[in-house]
Amino acid sequence: MSKKRPKIGVTGPDKGGFAAWWFTKWALRLQGAKAVRIQPKTGQADDIQGLIIGGGADINPQRYGASAMKELFTSSKETAESKSWGRKIVTAIFFPFIFFTRKLFSTKSHGVDDERDELEFGFLAKAVQNGWPVLGICRGAQLINVYFGGTLYSDIGSFYTEVPKVHSVWPEKDVEIEPDTKLFDIFNVSETSVNALHNQAVDVLGEGLTIAAREKNGIVQAVEHSNYGFLIGVQWHPEYMPQIPLQRRLFRELVQVAGDRRQ
């Protein structure tokens, strides 16, 4: 039986994306896995046991068709987790480092990246065929939905008419975790605070997918496949919240499933 660390493929763009890669690589290493960077220019990753589809540029709308926005409203509410002074202090210590690292090394994405779309749809197909555990982050969650035949809202701005739209690497957005989901089993909480860096979101749900988390205004914040061991997409960026044990559980579960498959 092999005791080698499982290898997890992590997709990203050819240009930029270094901060997301570095923090994801660190998150996987903390859980005993080796991260393998996958970019359009390289295109291949040998002998991987799991897949993370990272954040970045919008998916080409020709792959799904954009939808008109609905006007929904919400009210803000702090969770017990966000009220924890200990967690606030730890987050305050980590936040400047995460924020400035991301600003320093990230390249703002404009338009679409067709080569990356092609790469990630191909790797997701391989993952499904081979039964690899899959975690989609932000764009990755949206790509999972489109892969299974779903559609996206191309711009979620009008969901936030009365309440300002959160755009922050800091965990400032409250999401509700749906019961009887894999995500609920991993987190074991019904509500948590997350960061938010996305401008698109799931509209029509893809075939076989279920909603695992929502905002109070109805925007889908996480999806998962109901007939798959581990295939979860989250709109937030858990790699930018290493100070929160709850978020590290996503990587821990992914690595555990990948390790079991390797053995």
Image (cartoon, rainbow, N blue to C red):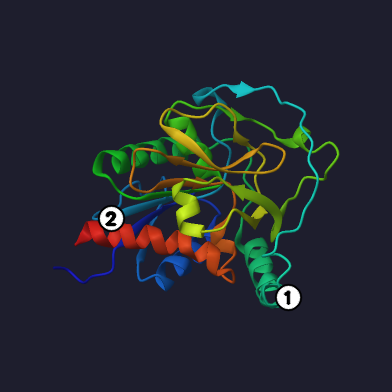
**Most foreground residue, 47 or 246:** 246
Residue 252, percent from left and from top: 41, 64
Decide if residue 185 is on the left or right side of residue 229. Answer: right
Q: Is 85 located above or below residue 202 in the figure? A: below
Please report whichever mark, 2 or 1, sits nearer to the chain's N-terminal start: 2
Q: Residue at x 34, y 38 (%)?
A: 227
Residue 78 visible at all: yes
Residue 243, percent from left and from top: 59, 72
Furthest residue in direction front, as rendered: 180
In 3D space, how far apart are the residues under numbered discs 2 and 1 (Cα atoms)? 40 Å
Q: Residue at x 61, y 36 (%)?
A: 201
Q: Residues within 10 Å of mark 1 (few under 14, many from 20)?
A: few
Q: Residues within 10 Å of mark 2 (few under 14, many from 20)?
A: some
Amino acid type, callout 2: Ile
Question: Residue 30's image quarter?
Answer: bottom left
Amino acid type, callout 1: Trp
- Mark 2 near mark 1, Cβ–Cβ under 8 Å? no
Q: Residue at x 30, y 58 (%)?
A: 258
Decide if residue 135 is on the left or right side of residue 4. Answer: right
Residue annotated with mark 2? 48
Residue annotated with mark 1? 85
Query: Which SS class for mark 1?
Result: helix
Residue 131, percent from left and from top: 27, 45
- Name the quarter where the C terminus is drawn: bottom left
Q: Is 200 located above or below residue 149 in the figure? A: below
Label ID, residue 151 = none
